[in-house]
Image (spheres, rainbow, N blue to C red):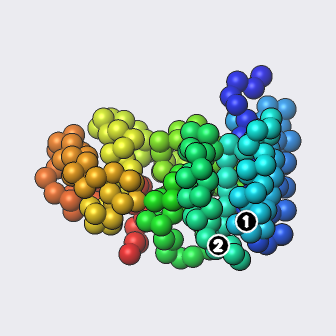
Amino acid sequence: MQTTESIRLFIVDDHELIRYAMESWMAQDTASSTLPPEPAIRVVGTASNGQDALSGVRSLQKTDTAPNFLLIDFQLPDMLGSEVIQTLRAEGITSEQMRALVMTGMENAPVKSILSSGANGYLSKKESSTTFLSAMRQVFLKPDDLWLNPAEAKRMLNAERSLTTAGITSAEKNVLRLLYLSNEEIAEALNISRGTVKNHLNNMYSKLGINSRPEAVQFALKVGLLPKHHS
């Protein structure tokens, strides 16, 4: 028996093959067993560019199929996926109403640009269908979490366990995930003040029994919150 609200997904990508593949993943996922994973995912709309995405999401807003999840390519023919998200957020569609994940084929994703737009994170297009489905469910069920590092499920569980044991909050965890940026850049990406970033860092140092940023970076690497190679 389904106990969780289903994910009503709107997919935006200029490649028809990618849109088709993703719709197929969702359909196969739903039909995979007599008890499919929750929450169920169903596609309620697709678009091939930013303007069609905006009009499509807007037109569905007052219907029973209003999307509560947007999966959007970063580089669209007419605008950036982050610009689409920023526009919808400015129009009052909050993250609580509609989660958003950005897809990118770029080696070094523009994390600051993606997060400051109001997205819940990003995924590499090289990831497997299983990772895409896991990421969507994680973000849907835990909207305060950012999906930045396409980690394996086991590593994610280990990270959660370590963070819970240390008493690290979701807000502090999001700062940990961005430690390769400066405090000013972290503040901009998360839409918080530099003072708040500093407070989160000091609180984490105290909880983890450490005294410096390099030690915090080592902890974040150890639990899988930071990729081993970052720029």
Looking at the picture, which amino acid does disc 2 mark?
Met
Q: Secondary structure at mark 1?
A: helix
Q: What is the spatial separation of the Cα atoms under label 1 and label 2, in whole angstroms?
A: 8 Å
Residue at numbered disc 2? 79
Residue 220 visible (yes or no): no
* Horizontal side, residue 10 vs residue 150: left or right: right
- Classify residue 37 by image quadrant: top right
Quadrant for the N terminus, please: top right
Q: Residues within 10 Å of mark 2 (few under 14, many from 20)?
A: few
Question: What SS does tag 2 mark?
Answer: loop
Q: Is residue 128 above or below residue 96?
A: below
Q: Residue at x 41, y 46 (%)?
A: 159
Whether residue 4 is visible to the viewer of this picture, yes or no, is yes
The answer to whether 178 is drawn above or below residue 154 in the figure is below
**Residue 99 x, y percent position in the rendering:** 60, 47
x then y, percent, for residue 154: 52, 48
Residue marked by disc 1? 51
- Cβ atoms under marks 1 and 2 closer than 8 Å: yes
The disc labelled 1 sits on which kind of residue? Gln
